[in-house]
Image (tube, rainbow, N blue to C red):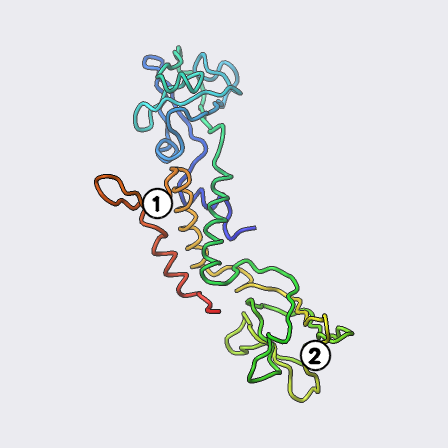
Amino acid sequence: MTILTVAELRAYLGIETSTTFTADPATDNCTLVSVPFATESISTGTPVTLTSSVAVPDLPAPLVEDTTYYVILVADQVIQLATSTANAEAGTDIDITDAGTGTHTITLSRNDDDLLQGAIEAAQSYIESQTHRLFESTAGTRYYQRDALDPWDNTKLHLDEDCLTVTELLNADASATEITAANYWLLDRNLGPPYHWIKLLSDTGIYWEFDPDMWVEVTGTWGYSATPPGDIVEACMVGAAYFYKQASAQVFDTTAIPEAGVITIPQGIPATVTRVIERYKRYI
């Protein structure tokens, strides 16, 4: 799971996977209705398939459904179609003999879902690594030894991750004795959740025990919040868009030193992302 979905990132980027078109048999040109599809989704050699809203004969002849064609980019929103990648690159188009009937739709034969998903995961991983926080809460158990105790207050156990809830707390004695919620506080009580300490109440007579080969076990929900804050979602969106454009263009953060001088491309992580990171950074 990730903070964003592929569909959300695709919508943010304005990436479309299909659009309608009209065909002109006099020029073999197909005019695309969607500007984002024409400018962002296709280029010469892009494989596509075609459908029409009415029964045969429907598509402009000799085009047929369930067949992969390859785009020849002629101009803004204007393409021709070829029978192979080689023909598309050579500019050898299909001779269209009529305009067909009904509404015609052109759809990408492949999509960038894997690339988009990878960009989302890269952006989320970057944000979490820089803030030292998890923005997708997960259930699990974490384990602690004596070195997790506050050196000035041995009733307090430091939690190394943001903690939202504790469902079970087991002491590190030989019996793994459960410590119930009535016997401890989660701290900071005014600022949490998330919490970063468990403090045993002074009037319970319970203290942390650390028998050999035993660990305090804290089972609960871990993460900054149950759902990601809005600005974190926005930062992940902006970051994912950045990583996607880098990967799809095969351009990465690189410093080149040609004869003309030093060139650094591109400018790096967007400022929107770094500003949000500073607000949520946890110092450990």
Q: State which quadrant residue 78 falls in.
A: top left
Q: State which quadrant residue 94 falls in.
A: top left
Return the residue found at the far front. Answer: 259
Pointer 2 residue: 209
Q: Amino acid at mark 1?
A: Thr
Answer left or right for 189 relative to 239.
Answer: right
Do the numbered discs 2 and 1 sit on residues whose CB atoms are within 8 Å? no
Answer left or right for 102 relative to 29.
Answer: right
Name the residue nearer the viewer: 91 or 11.
91
Residue 204 drawn above or below residue 22: below
Q: Position of residue 217 (x, y in %)?
A: 68, 69
- How many neighbours does mark 2 have within 10 angstroms: few (below 14), some (14-19), or many (20 or more)? some
Q: State which quadrant residue 154 falls in.
A: bottom right
Residue 284 drawn above or below residue 52: below
- Residue at (73% x, 73% y) in the render: 212
Under circle 2, the secondary element is: loop
Disc marking residue 103 = none
Pointer 1 residue: 254
Return the residue found at the far bottom. Answer: 203
Cα distance between the residues tagged 2 and 1: 52 Å
Residue 63 drawn above or below residue 199: above
Name the residue nearer the viewer: 161 or 28.
161
Q: Position of residue 43 (x, y in %)?
A: 37, 28
Q: Position of residue 164 (x, y in %)?
A: 58, 68
- Residue at (32% x, 46% y) in the render: 255
Q: Amino acid at mark 2?
A: Glu
